[in-house]
C-alpha cells in the first residue's frame, strides 16, 4: 500500500481541485480528505455516507455556579485567560479560550469545575463515484484537528486493507502546523501544489522544509504557471537545487472553476491540453510514489 | 479600532485585502500578520524589520533525581506531555501546551520552568506604519501561544500610540482563526464566488457569528463562479463591503508581490470605499 498526500502550504492553489482529478485518474484507491477544518473535496465527489460518527476529543472546563465560592483561584492559574469573573462575584469559563488543560479542575478548592468530554465534530466513510472516501468535519473554533487527521488516516488505511486497495490518496490540510504534521505521518510521497507568486514560493519553501524535517520526499506541481513565468522559473530553479521533481506546470484555465460549478472534477470535462497535462502528471506521481513506497519497505 | 481580515480558507485574497487596506488607511495604523504559520503580509508591505525576538513557551524541565514518582503531574496533564514510566520522569516537549499545571502540583520541586522556542516576533516599520508579525518555528505545532504573544505586543503598540490596527488573520475557522479575531472590533470576511469559496464562507460565518462582532464581506475574484455568496449575504443581511473584480492584472500584480490597491487607480478606489464602508459599519454596530 502506498500513501500520496497533496498539500500546498496554503489554501487557494487548486489543491482540492487537483486532488479531485487524481481521485478520478487513480485506480484502486481510497480517498481521504484531511483538510478537516474546511473540507471541500466532498463538494466535487458527493460521498454517500454509510458510516457517520461523532468525534469526541479532549475536555472542556465548566464551572458549576452552585459550587463556586468566587475565590478566583481558577482565573489566577489559567494561563489562557479563559476564566473570567461574571460580575456577581462568581467565575465562568469562556469555551472559545479554554484549552482543556485541567488546571482549574485540579486546583479549584471547592471542586466546582466539571470537565466533560468535548464533541468536536463528525467523521464518516462514504461511497463516491470514484471509490470509498473517508472525511470529517470539525466544528468551527475547535482544535485537535491533528488527532482527527490521524483518526481519518487510520480509517482510510483500514478501508484500503479490507477492500484490497493499493493507494490511499489524501487531500492534505493547509498550512504547516499541527494538522499538516499529522497529515504527513506515514506518507510515501507529498505532492506540493504551488503557484508562481512570491507568497506561493515562500509557502512552498516552508512546507518543503517541513517534509524534509519528517523525511518525506516532496514533488512539486506548479499551478497557473503562466500568471508569472519569471516566478515559475525561480520556483523551478529552487526545485532543481533541492532535487525536487516538478511533475507538471499547469496553466491558468477557467475549466477548473467551470468544473467546480458543475460539481465535477476537471478530468470529467471534455479533454483539453489542461487535462492532458494533468493526466501525465498523475502518471508520474504514481511512478514516484511507487519508488518511495518500495524504498521505505 | 482593530480590524481582522479573515477567510474561511487560505488563498481567497486575505493578504491582498489586508495589504491594500493598510495602504489606503488614512489614519495612524499598525499592520499585523497573525497568520504565524504562513506569514505573507511582509512580502507585500516589505517592512524594515528592526527587532527580532524569539518567543518561548514555558514548559516543565524534569529533574529525575528529585522525582518520587507520585504521578501527580502525569495525572493532571491533559495532553499526555508528561509521564512516569517505571522509575523515569519523561517530558514530551512538543506535546506540552504550557498550562503550568504540573509545575504547580509537583510536591517535590522535581519540575522547574524550562522553555521551548515557539518562533519569533518580528517588529519593524512599513513606511511610517508599525509592523508586527509572528513566525512559527518549523515543526512547531502550536500557533495560538505565539499569536497571543504577538497580540500582547500589539496591545502595547496600540496603547502607546492609540492607532488602529489591521490584522491579517490565519485562514480557516479552527482555533487559531477564532483566537485571532476574538479581540477585534470588526471582522472582514474575504471570499470567492465559487462552490468551494461559498462552502468555506458559510463555515466562517457560522464560526464567527457567535462572537457577536460586526462583520462585512469582501467578494474577491467577482465574476467567476456563481452568485451563491451574494444570495447568502442578502438573505442573512450581511453587508458586502466590496467586490474585487476578477482581473488578470490583479493576479499578476499579486504574483509579483504588489499591493493590489497600488496596481491601478480603479483598484485604489475599490479599497478606499472598502475602508469607508468598514468605518460606517463599525460605527453602526
Ligand atoms: S477556583 Fe473554584 S471556587 Fe474558586 S473561583 Fe474558580 S471555580 Fe470558583
Ligand atoms: S505544563 Fe501543562 S501541558 Fe505542559 S506538561 Fe505540564 S501539565 Fe502537561
Image: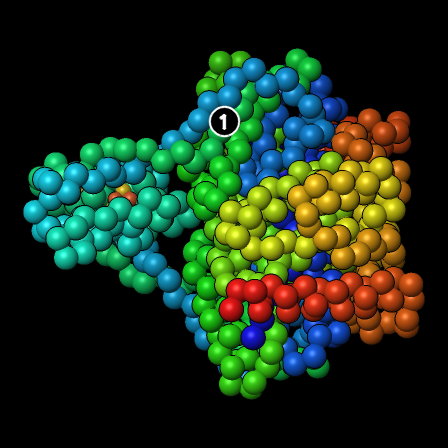
Residue A109 lies left or right of residue B14; in this view the side is left
> Looking at this view, is A240 or A73 the one in front?
A240
**Is residue A20 among what the camera can see?**
no
Q: Secondary structure at mark 1?
A: strand
Residue at point 20%, 43% (across, down): B102
Disc 1 designates what residue?
B121
Residue B31 lies left or right of residue A155; in this view the side is right
Query: To which quarter of the image does residue A27 belong?
Result: bottom right
Assign the C terminus of chain B to one quadrant of the image. Answer: top right
Locate residue A25, reporting x and y percent.
Answer: 75, 74
Image region (quadrant) for ligand 2: top left
Locate residue A34, reporting x and y percent.
Answer: 56, 63
Figure check: A284 above or below B45:
below
Residue at point 18%, 48% (across, down): B89
Residue at point 39%, 66% (across, down): A56
Residue closest to the far bottom: A163
Locate residue B216, reporting x and y percent.
Answer: 67, 42
Figure check: B168 above or below B210:
above
Amino acid at each position: 500500500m502506498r500513501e500520496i498526500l497533496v498539500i500546498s502550504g496554503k489554501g487557494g492553489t487548486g489543491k482540492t481541485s487537483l486532488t479531485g482529478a487524481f481521485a478520478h485518474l487513480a485506480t484502486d484507491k481510497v480517498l481521504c480528505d484531511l483538510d478537516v477544518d474546511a473540507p471541500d473535496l466532498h463538494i466535487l465527489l458527493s460521498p454517500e455516507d454509510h458510516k457517520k460518527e461523532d468525534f469526541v476529543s479532549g475536555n472542556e472546563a465548566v464551572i458549576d455556579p452552585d459550587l463556586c465560592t468566587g475565590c478566583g483561584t481558577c482565573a489566577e492559574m489559567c494561563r489562557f485567560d479563559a476564566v473570567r469573573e461574571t460580575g456577581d462575584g462568581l467565575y465562568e469559563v469562556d469555551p472559545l479560550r479554554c484549552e482543556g488543560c485541567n488546571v482549574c479542575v485540579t486546583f479549584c478548592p471547592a471542586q466546582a469545575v466539571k470537565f466533560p468530554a468535548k464533541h468536536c465534530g463528525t467523521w464518516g466513510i462514504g461511497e463516491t463515484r470514484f471509490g470509498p472516501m473517508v472525511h470529517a468535519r470539525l466544528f468551527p473554533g475547535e482544535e485537535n484537528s491533528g488527532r482527527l487527521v490521524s483518526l481519518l488516516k487510520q480509517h482510510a488505511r483500514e478501508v484500503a486493507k479490507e477492500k484490497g486497495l493499493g493507494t490511499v490518496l489524501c487531500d492534505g490540510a493547509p498550512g504547516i502546523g499541527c494538522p499538516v504534521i499529522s497529515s504527513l505521518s506515514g506518507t510515501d510521497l507529498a505532492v506540493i501544489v504551488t503557484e508562481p507568486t512570491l507568497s506561493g514560493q515562500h509557502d512552498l519553501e516552508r512546507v518543503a522544509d517541513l517534509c524534509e524535517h519528517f523525511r518525506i520526499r516532496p514533488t512539486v506541481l506548479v499551478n497557473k504557471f503562466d500568471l508569472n513565468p519569471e516566478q515559475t522559473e525561480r520556483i523551478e530553479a529552487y526545485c532543481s537545487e533541492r532535487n525536487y521533481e516538478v511533475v507538471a506546470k499547469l496553466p491558468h484555465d477557467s475549466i477548473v472553476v467551470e468544473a467546480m460549478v458543475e460539481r465535477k472534477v476537471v478530468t470529467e470535462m471534455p479533454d483539453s491540453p489542461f487535462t492532458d497535462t494533468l493526466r501525465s502528471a498523475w502518471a508520474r506521481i504514481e511512478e514516484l510514489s511507487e519508488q518511495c513506497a518500495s524504498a521505505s519497505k | 479600532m482593530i480590524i481582522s481580515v479573515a477567510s474561511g480558507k487560505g488563498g481567497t485574497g486575505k493578504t491582498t485585502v489586508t495589504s491594500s487596506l493598510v495602504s489606503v488607511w488614512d489614519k495612524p495604523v499598525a499592520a499585523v500578520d497573525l497568520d504565524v504559520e504562513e506569514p505573507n503580509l511582509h512580502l507585500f508591505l516589505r517592512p524594515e524589520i528592526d527587532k527580532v525576538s524569539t518567543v518561548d513557551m514555558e514548559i516543565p524541565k524534569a529533574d529525575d533525581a528529585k522525582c518520587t514518582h507520585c504521578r501527580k503531574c502525569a495525572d493532571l496533564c491533559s495532553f499526555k506531555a508528561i509521564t512516569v514510566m517505571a522509575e523515569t520522569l519523561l517530558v514530551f516537549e512538543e506535546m506540552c501546551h504550557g498550562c503550568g499545571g504540573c509545575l504547580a502540583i509537583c510536591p517535590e520541586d522535581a519540575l522547574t520552568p524550562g522553555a521551548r522556542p515557539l518562533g519569533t516576533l518580528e517588529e519593524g516599520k512599513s513606511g511610517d506604519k508599525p509592523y508586527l508579525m509572528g513566525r512559527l518555528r518549523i515543526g512547531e505545532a502550536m500557533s495560538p501561544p505565539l499569536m497571543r504573544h504577538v497580540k500582547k505586543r500589539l496591545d502595547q503598540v496600540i496603547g502607546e500610540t492609540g492607532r488602529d490596527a489591521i490584522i491579517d488573520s490565519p485562514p480557516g475557522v479552527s482555533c487559531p482563526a477564532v483566537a485571532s479575531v476574538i479581540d477585534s472590533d470588526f471582522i472582514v470576511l474575504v471570499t470567492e464566488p465559487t462552490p468551494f469559496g461559498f462552502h468555506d464562507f458559510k463555515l466562517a460565518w457560522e464560526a464567527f457569528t457567535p462572537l457577536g462582532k460586526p462583520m462585512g464581506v469582501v467578494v474577491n475574484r467577482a465574476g467567476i463562479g456563481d452568485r451563491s455568496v451574494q444570495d447568502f449575504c442578502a438573505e442573512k443581511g450581511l453587508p458586502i463591503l466590496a467586490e474585487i473584480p476578477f482581473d488578470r492584472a490583479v493576479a499578476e500584480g499579486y504574483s509579483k508581490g504588489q499591493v493590489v490597491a497600488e496596481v491601478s487607480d480603479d483598484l485604489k478606489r475599490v479599497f478606499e470605499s472598502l475602508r469607508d464602508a468598514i468605518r460606517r459599519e463599525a460605527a453602526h454596530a
